[in-house]
Amino acid sequence: MADAVTQTRDAGTGIARYAGKPIANCTNLELFNALLRMVRDAAQARGTNQGKKRLYYVSAEFLIGKLLSNNLINLGLYEQVRAELAAAGRSLAELEELESEPSLGNGGLGRLAACFLDSCATLGLPADGIGLAYHCGLFRQSFLGNKQCETPDGWLTWGQESWMRRASLHQTVSFGDFDVTSTLYDIDVTGYGSKCARLRLFDVDSADERLIKDGIAFDKRRVAQGLTLFLYPDDSDDEGRILRVYQEYFMCSNAAQLILAECEERGSNLRDLADYAAVQINDTHPSMIIPELIRLLVQRGIAFDEARGIVRDVCAYTNHTILAEALECWPKSFLQRVAPQIVPIIERLDADVRKSCKEPFVQIVDEHDNVHMANMDIHLSHSTNGVAALHTKILEDVELAPFRRLYPERFNNKTNGITFRRWCIACNPELAALVDRTIGDGWRHDATQLERLLEHEDDALLGELAAIKRRNKERFATWIERHQGAKVDPESVFDVQSKRLHEYKRQQLNLLWAIDAYLGIKAGKLPRRKVTVIFGAKAAPAYTIAKDVIHAILCLSQVVAADPVANKWLQIVMIENYNVTAAERLIPAADISEQISLASKEASGTGNMKFMLNGALTLGTMDGANVEIAGLVGAGNIFTFGESSDEVIARYQRGDYDPMSYYQDDERIKAAVDFLLSHDMLAAGDGHSLDRLAHELMCKDWFMTFPDFDAYLAEKDRMLEAAEDEATWQSKCLVNIAKAGFFSSDRTIAEYNRDIWHLTPDAD
Ligand code: Z57
């Protein structure tokens, strides 16, 4: 009888067939592998979205995260599989733990690309992501002696090759002094109840994993063997920088060859390429696709001027930052060494610009022979977009104003978005189910329907929201104890800042708050309820000050934990190896979402949207997409503070910011900074590192934490007080969830398609 039941159920999803034996007899690993193959086949059976014109989203990063549960959800199999496993006494959650995360990206930019592919698939758009098959994704972070350590993350060695289909395509890429052959791997990207998009990742045939020795250092001279081993090699020295140029040209040449071949196969005569291909250049990393496409078109007999026009009609560029240090600018000598064949093309494009425009700011090659990739993108594409309204406005009015005068019609905004499949349905199933029960499931395809939640606001709904948040906090507590042995109190307020460590994001401001709160507690000023400050952040291995901030946070965490009074009221936790998987556990559990970048510096932010969707309230500056969040939820449902972007930009222009005067005049600032060098902190950590951080703040503070310090403390205090009125707080959370629909990446992608790509959705 039991066997008969099992057999019928197995016939339902086929897990046992894929495993080759009954579920009950399988190890977890066997079940996991069976599910992988089953999902891969189900995705392939759906097929990919087709159409005459195809999007090629070219990006050096695709931070896709674990794939199993997301694919099960998108394929409509999740519930069935979970139930079938449960009936055999097995847990899908346990199998999910076996999957390792492909961290093929650093942060927001790579995660955005992954959300975009999900939305392209879901909206039926024929779309491919094109990138690199890094053998090791972003480094794995561990903490040793209160410092960040980095080790390689060889995600491919975990048996996940089964996601990757080796395509039969082999292309040759010629560098200055050698050639390589490339191999292409395809990953099906499932959409929600739709056909698939594809992620196409190029590798070099000659890759040699023996070069991944200890640590992330490897012999940078062996380019052909090392090209795809790591995501974004350390770029603090010239050898590192040149390897990055090799990676970029490898990606661009492969993409250009692939696009031309595919479009010809679909019927293009290349002169009409823009009817067959839209190329979206994700930040400047793929910029060399422009001269490479021109080169290949000229090689195929098209005149230079015509080729230039074709490429302009095909390409569009997205800018993700105004930070000068992130705008790529390569010495011509690097390009000469890596890809001499595109240098004359870049020179000719530069000469054309100089002929038609005298403004030096817009030139492609500057007087030091540096090639400004963003400038080439803007001249040689038909669209330049920013990623949030404020960011686009700063590009248009300040950073790129001379370009705006040249090409006013090319500038446009596309406010970022996130896929609600991963960032609500998968990571917060209880909230998704509550929404379904309250307004039906139409929001899963049309996220704006979330607004209807507001019509159902009553004590019962707010009570359920609070109960779900509480259970998510308990789930997180269980996870982090298993993950790194930390015990957190789900009764406390979870105050979360998770994102890459960067000075402009100002984790140091939050750190100064925590020091101030600790000193307050020691002086007898107790908070209303315990606060757990949770950080998640990786620092670039060569970014010294960022690592100093991590060190200070970890030292403070130890000092507070060791204090028998303070540890009842305050806890500081830093998640080890923060990644997509950790974010999926953390975000649904957050009460406070810290979005405290210096106004004007965070192009958009996308974590801010994920927290909002999961019912956390934002404590933020008027920066990036925070401005749009504030506009949607209204002033009563967000906590904002700090100088405006106009004030900040004016302060930089005046150049008269003097952190030392703030340090001297503001007692609380002085006490917090001095505490970095206190006896307790020095006992917990490294005096050099703490001293360097204290001096950086007092003498430089390039991202102006001190001018916002008082306002931040005051607003956080107001917020923590508000958190004690549960009903009012939950009603604010409800407004945030209800208004989050605008930030669905389905909306973002629909706008890209309407304004830039003009693809026809695959209807069947
Ligand atoms: C990156 O993650 C972003 C911008 C960059 O220029 C690079 Br390189 C990496 C981020 C921005 O900092 C975020 O504000 C933005 O939300 C994200 O890109 C996606 O647009």
Image: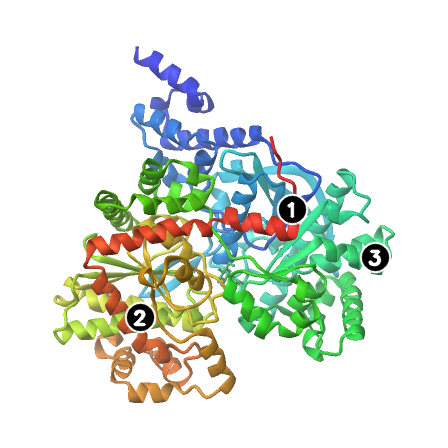
The mark closer to the camera, 3 or 2, is 3
Mark 1 and mark 2 in contact? Answer it, CB < 8 Å: no
Secondary structure beneath dot 3 equals helix
Q: CA distance from mark 3 to mark 2?
A: 56 Å
Residue 306 - label: 3
Q: Considering depth in this image, is 403 or 81 the residue closer to the camera?
A: 403
Amino acid type, callout 1: Leu
Q: Is residue 386 left or right of residue 760?
A: left
Residue 128: quadrant of the picture: top right
Can you give x and y, in whole percent of width and height, for residue 117 in the image? 55, 45
Q: Residue furthest top?
A: 1
Q: Considering depth in this image, is 538 or 508 the residue closer to the camera?
A: 508
Q: Residue at x 15, y 74 (%)?
A: 522
Upstream in sequence: badge 3 or badge 2: 3
**Above or below — where is 189 with respect to 271?**
above
Residue 347 - label: none
Q: Which residue is mark 2?
A: 511
Q: Is residue 590 visible?
A: no
Q: Which residue is mark 1?
A: 55
Q: Residue at x 49, y 31 (%)?
A: 39
Secondary structure beneath dot 2 equals helix
